[in-house]
Image: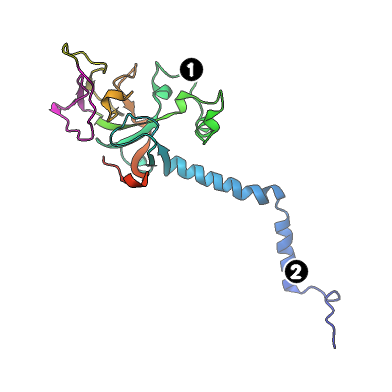
Amino acid sequence: MAVEKKNDQQPGPVDAQTAQHRKGHSRIHPFWDFWGPVLFTFALYFGIRQFVVEARYIPSGSMKPGLQVQDRLLVEKLTSFFKGPKRGEIVVFNSPYAFDPALRASTRPSPLHCVVVNLPLIGWISGLANPACDAYIKRVIAVEGDRVSVNPRGEVILNGDKLNEPYVTNYCSVDEQGMSPCRTLNGTVPKGSVLVLGDNRRNSWDGRFWPSSPFLPVDEILGRAVWRFWPTSRMGGLSG
């Protein structure tokens, strides 16, 4: 029976090409063999989160009854690159501590710092949390050029007409003297800004209470809340 002798054959053209191909691949450092795909995955994740869509949860009752505490939402970001916010939309935006001159620190935290502190569990580490890295969620009530006023109950007069707001059920209390714990507002929305208010007018820290200006710069808007995915019993699109 003949025995095949493998070791005494000269490599053919195909074998030489294969060896050269393997040699080229061997030049990749082992570090990149493992960490390359990992870093690419993280870059893809943060790229999608930063520019396309991200998940957010509701930390307070300022948007009740429509949005409840711990609701999970999808925030869409692509639209903001092509058009401005519209009345009635629910938007997520940077904390007033990031842009209000009376609240912000001398230096604004970097975007990378805010990404890190907003990762699960990281923000609980003492010394890392920064109120300028928080995000708020409110509803757009008026856009640039609108004449708007808000009375002590939290009711809105927009361009001379009372605004119909079926999503608001919890207005501010007013005593017999017309006094209310909620602040009033009266003005015209400047260029490049909007007015945002919480649906829960009795318990929302919104433009009525910001010290420097009641209006939100459009550049501070991170995206639109478009879909609630948790709890599943209330899953669905958000009106706006």
Reply above or below: 45 against 69: below
23 with respect to 2 (left or right): left
Would you identify the image quadrant in which residue 78 lies?
top left
Q: Quadrant of the N terminus?
A: bottom right
Residue extending farthest to the top is: 177
Return the mark for residue 106: 1
Q: Amino acid at mark 2?
A: Ala
Q: Nearer the viewer, residue 138 or 176?
A: 176
Residue extending farthest to the left is: 161
Q: Position of residue 107 (x, y in %)?
A: 50, 20
In this rendering, does residue 56 appear at all? yes
Residue 3 is covered by the magenta coloring: no
Q: Which residue is mark 2?
A: 16
Q: Nearer the viewer, mark 1 or mark 2?
A: 1
Q: Position of residue 159 (x, y in %)?
A: 16, 27
Is the stretch drawn in magenta largely helix, strand or loop?
loop
Q: Amino acid at mark 1?
A: Ser
Would you identify the image quadrant in which residue 5 lies?
bottom right
Which portion, as a residue range, is magenta? 145-174
Q: CA distance from mark 1 to mark 2?
A: 64 Å
In this rendering, does residue 76 appear at all? no
Reply above or below: 21 against 169: below
Q: Nearer the viewer, residue 73 or 17?
A: 73
Reply above or below: 103 against 27: above
Residue 154 is covered by the magenta coloring: yes
Which color scheme is applied?
rainbow
